Amino acid sequence: MEKKPAHQSLCRANSQCSLSFVFPLVFFLAIGLLITLAGCSSVPVKDENIDLAWPPPPEQPRIRYLASYSSQLDLGGKNSLKARLLGADPRGVAIQKPYGVTATDDGRRIYVADTKQAAIIVFDFDTKKVYRFKTDARGALRSPIEVRVDSRGRLYVTDPVRSRLFVFSPEGETLLALGAKEKLERPTGLALDESRQRIYVADRGAHRILVYNLEGEFQYAFGERGTGPEQFNLPINLTLDKDGNLYVVDFGNFRVQMFSPGGDFLGMFGEAGDKMGNMARPKGIAVDSDGHIYVVDAAFGNFQIFNREGRIMLFVGQMGHHPGQFWLPTGMYINAQNRIYIADSLNARIQVFQYLPEQQTQ
């Protein structure tokens, strides 16, 4: 794996990266003047009067809060008197308990795996509608955990209750239902590598990673239960970087393991604890365009950012209900615009942030 200076992009290039700006947590919630969110105009921003950035001044910001989305009201819907009189939810379609989240590269659609509703909830910024993605009977979901979308608009959804990975057409037709032959037990994490024609699936129940091609043909599997390299204890979430390297959240071992596109073990980082850089309940994982590794931790109520060597660079958030705070965060995704999507589970919302590369902050 290509090595980068430990302080690249997240810290000034002419100084050593200091952790002083990440502790205590309260200093992260700096409320400033009204700003214009440059470079983020492709998606409507609801929380226009909130200015949150990490690290706080005088450091240059690397992460900026953009918005939160939970229902039709966040896309311009109205609190309907008729709905209230009829006993319906005046917010229209709303998230109840999100776990997985993904978005298109242009940010015009957000897809949310809602475990409580057993449905994929879609936020469509073009039509300004929020709706449940309708599937056929074959692909009826019982507990969707992770969701991804490819360049053709096909949806990939893991359902551990049904022990399947489903692939849907944009219209909701079930194209593939994978896992019967391979005896998938509890599929959770999911990653797509369209350039290499691969689908990666984390099977939490069997402590392994399965690899399919995009036609749904099984390629190979690796991993077994254990604590050593290339062994897992409840692998739960996956992501890829731009080079096709795979990152696995090894939940029960409180760490992240890294593998090359060819399946070679590249390294691992993380350990149990309550200090910065430790992990307690690691969940979602993503990588930005500069190769920084983001890990959501449900116990800490934040997401931590590491360099490629596994050294902590920054963490964002704390337990709470306000913007930039989390209550049992789970899945995450970073799209092509470095927009960061976090499933804030018990706050029943998706929070959106922006990673600001070095050249954008000079």
Image (cartoon, helix red, strand yellow):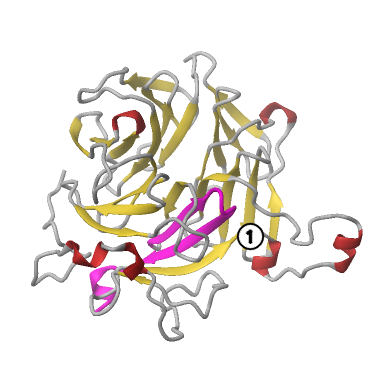
**At which x and y percent is residue 231?**
27, 22
- In the shown orientation, is residue 209 left or right of residue 79? left
- In the shown orientation, is residue 128 left or right of residue 304? right
Neighbour tally class for label 1: few under 14, some 14-19, many 20 plus, Cα within 10 Å = some
Q: The N terminus appears in which quarter of the rendering?
A: top left
Query: To which quarter of the image does residue 319 belong?
Result: bottom left
Q: Which residues are magenta?
A: 338-362
**At which x and y percent is residue 121?**
64, 49
Query: To which quarter of the image does residue 195 belong?
Result: top left
Q: Residue at x 30, y 47 (%)?
A: 241
Q: To which residue does mark 1 refer?
A: 124
Q: Residue at x 25, y 28 (%)?
A: 263
Q: Residue at x 23, y 71 (%)?
A: 358
Q: Is 90 situated above or below 51? A: above
**At which x and y percent is residue 97?**
60, 45
**At which x and y percent is residue 334?**
40, 54
Q: Secondary structure at mark 1?
A: strand
Q: Nearer the viewer, residue 358 or 150?
A: 358
Q: Quick check: is 339 in the magenta stretch?
A: yes
